[in-house]
Each structure stands twice: as C-alpha cells, then as structure tokens.
Image (cartoon, helix red, strand yellow):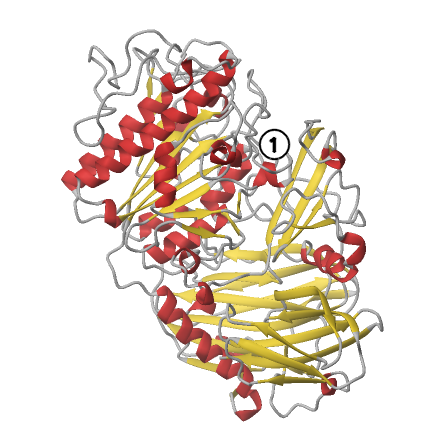
Amino acid sequence: MKIKISILLVCFNIGMVLQAQWFKKAHLNTNNEPNIIYIYLDDLGYGDLGNFWQNQQTGAKKMLSPQMDLLANEGAMLTHHYTAAPVCAPARSSLLEGLHQGHASIRDNQFDMPLSNGLNVAQVLSKAGYKTMHIGKSGLAGKRNLSIDPYPDPASLEAHPMKRGFDQFFGFLYHNQGHLHYPEPTNTKKYCYFTDGYNMLMDNTELCYTTDAFAAKSKQWISEHRSNNPEQPFFLYLAYDVPHSALQVPTQAYPAGGGLNGGLQWTNANSPTPYVNTASGTKDSFIHPDYASKNWTVNEKKHATMIRRVDNAVADLLQLLKDLNIDEQTMIVFSSDNGPHSSGGQKAQSFQSYGNFNGIKRDMWEGGIRVPTICYYPGVIPAGIEVDFPSGQWDWLATFCELANTTVPAYTDGVSLMPSLKQENDKQVDKGYTYHEYTAAGATPKYSDFELSKRGRKRGQMQVIRMGDYKGVRYNVQNHSTPFEIYNVVEDEREENDLASSMPVLQQQMLDKVLQVRKAEVVNRPYDKELIPAVELENVKRGLLKSTYSGKYAWVPNFEYLSPIESVICESLEDINSDEQDSEVGYYCNAYVNVPRDGTYTFYLNSASNCHIMLHDIHLLDNDFHFSENEISSVVNLKAGYHPVRIFYQQNELKTPLIELFMSGPEMTKNPISFFFEKLTSSNPMSEASKMINLYPLPAGDMLNISLNNSFSGRYEVIVYDITGHIVYSDDRAELAGSKELSISVKPLKSGVYVCKIIAHTKGEIFEKQFIKA
C-alpha cells in the first residue's frame, strides 16, 4: 500500500523539492570537465609554507616558498582542512576512498596494506571518462617480504595502482621505499627502486632525485596525453615522498626555465642523464643558494632545500599547463598527508613546521592533522581567497565528482567543496562534523613552544570530532567514558582553553555522534562494543518515505542530491518489490527502525541490483561495487529506540526491483524490518515545550528569528538539526535577557525541514520546534 504525499506532509515535501532545485543549480556543471592534478606531499607541516606560517616569522630561521605563495595568491587557501589521520597510509587510504577513518579500509599504521578493491577517486574519474595516472609514492599496493623476495613481480600485488583504477603508474610501490629520495635497488634495508607500470627499473637510476624524476615524468605524461588525446580530461595523482624521512637534496640547481622546453625534462634509460636531465653530478650535494650561507645546521639547510625544490617543480608544472594552453582548464590541489616529522635528523621545531599549533606527525592536536592546502582553478576559484569551512581530504572524491559532472556515490563520507571554493557559501553542504581516529605509541614532544598541558601527552588510542567551531579530542582513550577535551579552534587554534566543563550538552553530543558515524572493523578500538545511541522522535507512524529516480549510473548515487520523479509514503519495502519490471530506475528510502532493547543486532540485505544501506551515518551494508545476488549481513550494537536508516538502490538492467532487509537480535529471530517515519506536518499538535517558541518568518530565508514565551533569562543553547538528526548549527554561549528574542543566520543551510532546539541550562528546560528553510 502506498499513499501519495498530501497536505499532511507538506513540510517534508516542500523540503525535498527545494533541496532538489538547489542541487540542480549548485551541482550540474555545464562546462567541459577540467583536468585535475592532486599534488600530495609527505610530512609537510602546516607551518612549512610561506603564506600559511613562514612569512609571519621574523627571526633568522625562515624558509621561502615563493611559487607556492603565488599559487595561493591566485587561488584559494584552505585554512581549516584536515588529513584523515596523522600518518601516511591511513591518510592516503581515506583520500583515495573518500572515507574518513571510521570507514576507510586502512587505519592506524597499516603500511603497505592493500587498498580495498572498491570505489575510489581513480575508479570514479576513470568511469567518468578521465585518463588517470599515479606518479610517486603509493604505499597501498600490498606487502612484500624482504627476507624472502625483495623484488616481487609488481603484477602480483593485490592492489597495484593499475588494479585500483589508475591507467598508469610510475614511482615507489612500497612504503619504506619512500624513506629514501634516490633509488638504491640493492639497499638491503629498503630495496628502493622505481616501478614503471609493472616493470621494475633496476639500472642507471642512482642519481635520479625523486622530486625531479616525479616532476619530469608528470610533465612528460601530460604532454603526451595532450598530444594524443587532447579532448580527454586527465587526473594526475602526484605523490611526492618529501620532506619525509631521509634528509637528501638534489645533485644540482634547478634547470633554467620551465614548462614545455625548460626546467626538468624526462629523458630515457640510455641518456647521458638517465630518465631525468638532472641525473648527473654528485648525489645529495646541492643546497639552495638562499640557504647556503645561513648560520643553520646542515640538516636545516637540507630540509629547506627539499621543500624549495618542490616549490620550483610546481612552478615548472604550472608553466607546462600554460604552454599547452590548458592552465584555465585544470584544477590543481596541493596538500600534505599529515603534520611535520621529527626524524632522520630533522627537528620540526627548527622552523616551527607545525605553525602556531601544538603537535606533529602522529598527534591529533591541530599540528598533526590540520594540513596546508591550496586549490587553484583560474576563472572558477576567485584569486586570493581563504576558505575556512571545516573539511577533510575525504571530501575530494565528492568534489571531483562535481568537477567531472558525475554523481556523488552513496558510499562516501565527503561532500563537494566547490561551493566554498567558489565563495558560494550558502550552497555548501555541511554534514556538521569531521571525524578522525588513530592510535600510536609515544607522546607529544615536549617542545617549549607547545602549550604546557600538551607536552609529553601520552598518545595511545586517540579520537577527534569537530562540530562547527568546536573540536573534541581525547588522548589515551581507555573506554567510551573518557571525556573529550573541547576547544574552539577558530578562536583558540593552539587548543589552550578546554571548554569541556562548561559544555556538558556538546560533550554528550560528541560522545553520541562518534558512535553514529563509524563502523567497528579493521582495527580494535576501546569503544567498538559500545551501544550506538538512538534518536528521539515524536508522532511516529508506520511506513517509510520512498522516492523514485530515473537514470543510469555506474554506481549507487547519493539520491539526496538528485531530483525524484515521485515521492510517496509506503508501508514497507514490498511497495518497491511489487513494482513492475524496469530499467534505469533508482530508489531512495528514508525511515527509522525501532530497536526493542539494548543489544547486538544483525542486519541482512537481499537486493536484485546495486544497493547501499546506511544506519545513522554508518555505511552498514554495501552491495554496490561488488554486487552479489547472495544475502549480505552486518553486525552492530544498538541502544533501544529509533535509529535512522537510509536505503539507496540503483537498477540499470530490466528486471523486477527487490530490496529485502531483515534484522535479528536479543530475543528476536530473523524477521523483515518494520519501518517508521516521523510525521512532519503543519497541523501536528504542538507539545507544551514547542508552544513556548515562536519562529519567524516561515519559511525562513537568510535569518531565523526566535522568541520565547516564558520568563527565562540567562545562558541558553541554540541547536538546529536537519531531517536526519545532523547538527547544522550550534551556539551554546549566548545570553538571553530582556526582549527574549534572538536571530540566527540560517543562510548556509540548504532548503529543507529542520528542528530548532533551545536549551535553557540554568533551569534545565528544553524547547523545540520545526521550521522550513526556503
């Protein structure tokens, strides 16, 4: 049985329509798809670049990055951009998979673990028509046993980049090869050699400085692709292995000029300078003249020279794009995998490579996870802007989907950053949080310029969630009762003033949210077995909202960004299963499941075509990339109550649709799931609490005015939730007196239905009411 949405559901229906209209306007790009270059450095700190920190230095220890500064001045600086984890392997996994560390297939220190064979940036762009190339450090291809065979056939590796969506690869396949910046194929600790596709390069590479070789190879590949396939866009993932680990510098000065005919040039194996035109002279000998006469240590001069070399290489690459007349058709993203290291003789304290933050590589303070990021796309991204929207490297998959004019997959944790990059902030989708988890031995260094309480802090199990301006962070987590320290990292970027004692509501929200956004797998965490909190609902009815979509997609899309052809309330999934045979059809179902008691539950899925199931923000069941006609299942620990479920289903072939979801648990055999929805109506009887709030104008535009019909005066908290329970606005420090009226900006929110909650802390009262954002 199905019921057409009527006036009783006017709030929800208007929200869906307005959201769909917003998506069409914000996400459908009518221009040609641009080329994309993602430049990834290894252990480059937020403070290592001029515009981010070095240019503010006044002492003798100051590095220069003039070309990177120019790139930032002509593009955007992302000043609140985060890596997924403060070490390379999990960070790279999250970047490529578009998943934060609560869902990524590689976590903690799982170096050389094979990247999951699923949807990733390269797969998405390849299916969207891009030519894809990975140059530089991989570290996610699979393991080798140095004592048995240090030279395994590259084609035998489970996750060789060319088996994970890349058309071609050149660089280091293994994590420890990136510890050196000159190949040493017979080095019995590293066995460090280049791999070109599936071929190992064992000879004549000993003078090939990796920064030079990777830059020259990139230029050659772009030039050849432009010559052979000028109409096909390309994606280049250029992952340098510096300034990580060994302090090694080039053989000579950077070649004059740049671009097509100057700068670094790729040669060949038989050239007097094999592979790259700087493969001559003395290995590890050149110090940049700006630093040669400085009263610095040798290691400091080397560190500065290594970064300056990349600075030159980026300018060389940009000149090539200009020479080929494709600079305005190319987006360049420049970033780092984590905070700065203090190893191999280099000390992060020398140049304050962590900027004004605390923490380094393997720390979850800002210095370990906030990374310098520049985005350049002339004519699209305004020049010289600063983007302070909190974002993570897992957002680039969704961002590149928008650039490629293709749909964002359901199986990603990211959102497109294009609205923020184009300064269209009112169109920016905000999930309301960024999430990180990681474990490491050791402690935060006891640097004298670190905040006292951070020095020597034992790491262990660490977890971070940022919600708006507030960051919750906990070190050495023993169990889920370990509280978060809470910092306003916009006003207090050094994380000096812990606000946790004055923000108990936010503390609980953070403790709840971190359980609702991650899947307990891959590694062990002390909170894995915690029960996931339910959500509070009123006026619950049996049924689910089913929206139908038309179109053929290479993966299950996130239908929340697309326009439905029909939306109805159904009693069960049988409404879908009774539909006639169809092709190129998709369904999105939004509902709640009622869990009768606390305990461990198993969810089971059978589907006739590709399907993805989310519980809260957990990717619970994925039957998409590796579609199976067999039943799949997943186990999860839940508190009693209502839990939001979202079902994404895409069918490209002519067949009868089928989605079957079952659940079993404590004192509960395996049965079909009964679904519920919260009836959002304009005629719902208001609770006594909701009668205490007046909201206007409705629908809300840029501002929402709130008035309270009581005598309350004092500190209050304003929270706005979206329809799925995500916090999209929070302010817990305001004071209310006199008029008992206030105004909040809802301009950044997309169109839809929201709940405004007022918490009067001094009296312990809570008032809430729904509203529509136009």
Residue drawn at x 44%, y 66% is 427
Rendered location of residue 746, percent (x, y) = 55, 72
Which of 131 and 143 lies nearest the eye of the viewer? 131
Q: Is residue 637 above or below residue 304?
A: below
Residue drawn at x 21%, y 32% is 259
Which of 135 and 763 lies nearest the eye of the viewer? 763
Rendered location of residue 320, percent (x, y) = 22, 35
Q: Quadrant of residue 765?
A: bottom right
Q: Quadrant of residue 601?
A: bottom right
Q: Circle 1 — which element? A: loop
Query: Which residue is the extreme one toward the top?
Result: 282
Rendered location of residue 178, percent (x, y) = 46, 23
Asked if residue 249 lies left or right of residue 431, the reply is: left
Asked if residue 546 lies left or right of residue 221, the reply is: right
Which of 130 and 294 lies nearest the eye of the viewer? 294
Q: Which residue is mark 1?
A: 360
Residue 513 appears in the rendering: yes
**Label 1 neighbour load within 10 Å: few <14, some 14-19, many 20+:** many
Q: Is residue 259 above or below residue 434?
A: above
